Amino acid sequence: MLFTQLEYFVAVAREQHFGRAAAASFVSASALSESIRKLEAELGVPLVRRGRSFQGLTPEGEAVLVWARRMIADHRALKDEVSSAAARLNGVVRVGVIPSGVALAARVLAELCATHPDLQVRLVTGLTSEQVVGGLRSFEFDAGLLHPSAAAADDIRHILVETDRLVVVGAASRSDFGETIELAALEGLPVCVLEPSMRARQILDDALSERGVRLRPRVEVDSVEALLALARTGEWVSVVPRSAVPKAAASIGVKVAEIVRPEVSIPIVLAMLGEEPRPPLSLAVDAAARRLVTPPA
């Protein structure tokens, strides 16, 4: 059994398509298919249901997928351990992030790469907290930035990295709000917000409900970047995390109003699998985040 066979099999399970899996693996579709057939022959069971196209995994394939992901993750961790022992941690660190954690992720990864310049980064954004946790458990991510409610599980370790605040942003030319805005005043504005599945949106909805405010968003999106783009048009205002807006907000054509009465806070944690021994990449991300929380004296 070769690790490449396991990697190709995991790619097919992820992409749900032989052609896309082959492209992601930088091999031809025929080579990938033949590799998986050899894996099936060695294990003595069919792993993939085939028709004219990919039809899904067999029950045996679903069971093998769990082990394949674990074996690939352990193989990566072994190589990272050897690399770390040689004082040159390298490889690709994979991080999943919720929309309100993108700015924080940039700071954590900048800190990480300043310490380990040979590392490469794969950052996946626009996820829900549950999707981030799912990616950790399936070994697709080494670490994730998410809301703490989804990280409250025995197999997940996490640290609080930041508590952000929601603010309102709109085009610099708008005159219907100033430097602060009461939460209830959102009811009368053309508001853009994150999708209801996003935890930051749920926190906002809970705060509105406590005040008896019924918000009818004009636009719902799955990324903070989209919210900022919509606000810049002047047609709408957007509710975003404060950390997502440059300190010089005017430089991107918007102005910012702090939400008051009440403030709406969003805690963000760094989460990783609670496995032992801890992989070097996870340890490195953890250390980078902790340096941001507690800068050196």
Image (cartoon, helix red, strand yellow):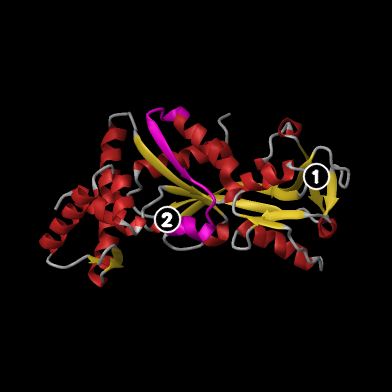
Residue sitting at x 70%, y 46%: 230
Is residue 84 highlighted in magenta?
A: no
Residue range (magenta): 114-135
The x, y position of residue 178, in whole percent, is 87, 43
Q: Is residue 73 above or below residue 201?
A: above
Look at the image and tell me whether residue 264 can be seen: no
Kindly state the secondary structure of the residue where label 2 is placed.
helix
Residue at numbered disc 2: 135
Report whether 278 appears left or right of 285.
left
Q: Nearer the viewer, residue 155 or 245?
A: 245
The x, y position of residue 155, in whole percent, is 41, 60
Residue at numbered disc 1: 257
Look at the image and tell me whether residue 238 can be seen: yes
The x, y position of residue 146, in whole percent, is 54, 53
Report whether 62 appears left or right of 189.
left
Give the image quarter of residue 197: bottom right
Q: Is residue 40 above or below residue 92?
A: below
Crowding at mark 1 (Cα within 10 Å: few <14, some 14-19, many 20+): some
Is residue 116 highlighted in magenta?
A: yes
Residue type highlighted by circle 2 = Gly
First reached walking from the N terminus: tag 1 or tag 2: 2
Residue sitting at x 81%, y 65%: 211
Q: Which mark is residue 92?
A: none
